[in-house]
Image (cartoon, rainbow, N blue to C red):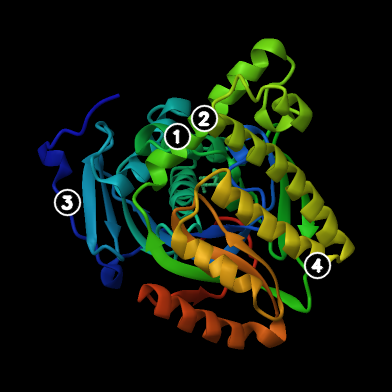
Amino acid sequence: MKNTTQSENRQTIALNLENFVHELIVESPGRINLIGEHIDYNGGHVLPAAIDKKIKLYLKRNNTRKCNVWSKNFDNGFSFSIDDVGISNVEWENYILGVIHYIDQIYPGSIHGFDCIVESELPMGSGLSSSAALECGIATGLNNLFAIGLTKDEIIHLSRDAEHNYVGTKCGIMDQFTVVRGQKDRLILLNCQNLEYRMIQADLEPYHLVLLNSNVSHNLASSEYNNRRADCEAALAIIEKDHPNYHYLVDVPEDVLKSFKEDLTPTMFDRAAYVIQENRRTQLAAEALEKGFFEEFGRLLFESHHGLRNNYEVSCEELDFMVDYAKTQKGVLGARMMGGGFGGCTINVVHKDEISSYIERISIAYRKQFGIDLTPIEVSISDAVEVIK
Ligand code: GLA
């Protein structure tokens, strides 16, 4: 793959929404995940949903070979020739460059020069997957702008490939799938092995989902994410030697895993145990939700956090503090860290009458402990990425 060349084609052109005459606007949602964390890349079940917090992309063709992208939030942008889409050393640029590269692999020459302004209401590093929103948003926008004919499945997969090979995070498929397939008021029970899915009514009345952003985002996220994936693949490779029928870590029964205790490193063993248990928890949680057993559902969320903290080790002290605190609170059925980890949000299941007092109390306690203000984020479950003319 090519490296960035600082040719004159890369001189940035600033764009301003005030006088920008767009041809189309794309609204691309973030996502929440109720349970099933770090198991999408292990062939597990996840329970995510798209949300009403979004990234908006304003797009128009410019009849040149040049592409100009401007981030309203960063007040910064970049320009490049469509004939020179190498990897950049600025991370967010790679979400866009990667998507363009992979669209071009499927439909060579289909993209021409364009101008794009990106405006986001998704805080980065908060576990709401602003990355997938950006990837699937630009893919959907370009698909429409140039009438390329990409299918939803192609958009999901090429966006994931962009993240793997341009950004460098070896993510699973959950985020891109949710951004492209989400539906209002529905959770997606997704089997990440074969992408079969079932929509579940997101109705927890009188309980609501409350997101609390810890406002910390530890740098480890991307490198440690890839390390976790590598640990899981290494564990599976050892087990597969004796059991060639298991192609995914989630499929290994727990007693089989136990029989490998001596063959795996303690770290690999812990990671694998978490993965197998979390997959079961997710299926139980979906069942509990459908039957209206909300206390059971909440308990599974606490258990999920316990595993993420102790066995999978992707939490951090700020998130642990918030979840421990949640356990002591009236009207809170469950809470856990959400997304890749090492910071970002917790997701909490809270009785609607207790929400404001809970937020007030936990905010005070968190500030006292860390000197940081947490941010409650109100979300409702919403539709997938869409083009608005
Ligand atoms: C990130 C990745 C997803 C998933 C989650 C953890 O959001 O992009 O694929 O692995 O972390 O569940």
Q: Position of residue 334 (x, y in %)?
A: 69, 67
In this view, which residue lies farthest toward the right?
291
**Front-most of 101 and 165?**
165
CB of mark 3 within 8 Å of CB of mark 1? no
Amino acid type, callout 2: Asp
Mark 2 → mark 1, Cα distance in angstroms: 6 Å
Please report the residue visible at 71 percent of the width from the left and 52 percent of the height from the top.
188
Please report the residue visible at 71 percent of the width from the left and 42 percent of the height from the top.
277
Instruction: Single out the mark in the foreground, 3 or 1.
Output: 1
Crowd rating for badge 4 (residues with CA inside 10 Å; few <14, some 14–19, many 20+):
many
Report if the beta carbon of the residue with label 2 is closer than 8 angstroms to ligand 1: no
Amino acid type, callout 3: Thr
Residue located beneath label 2 in the image: 231
Amino acid type, callout 1: Asn
**Image quadrant occupied by the N terminus:** top left
> Is residue 121 in view from this perspective?
no
Q: Secondary structure at mark 1?
A: helix
CB of mark 2 within 8 Å of CB of mark 1? yes
Mark 3 → mark 1, Cα distance in angstroms: 35 Å
Crowd rating for badge 1 (residues with CA inside 10 Å; few <14, some 14–19, many 20+):
few
Q: Position of residue 84 (x, y in %)?
A: 24, 32
Residue located beneath label 4 in the image: 294
Residue located beneath label 1 in the image: 227
Residue located beneath label 3 in the image: 12
Crowd rating for badge 2 (residues with CA inside 10 Å; few <14, some 14–19, many 20+):
some
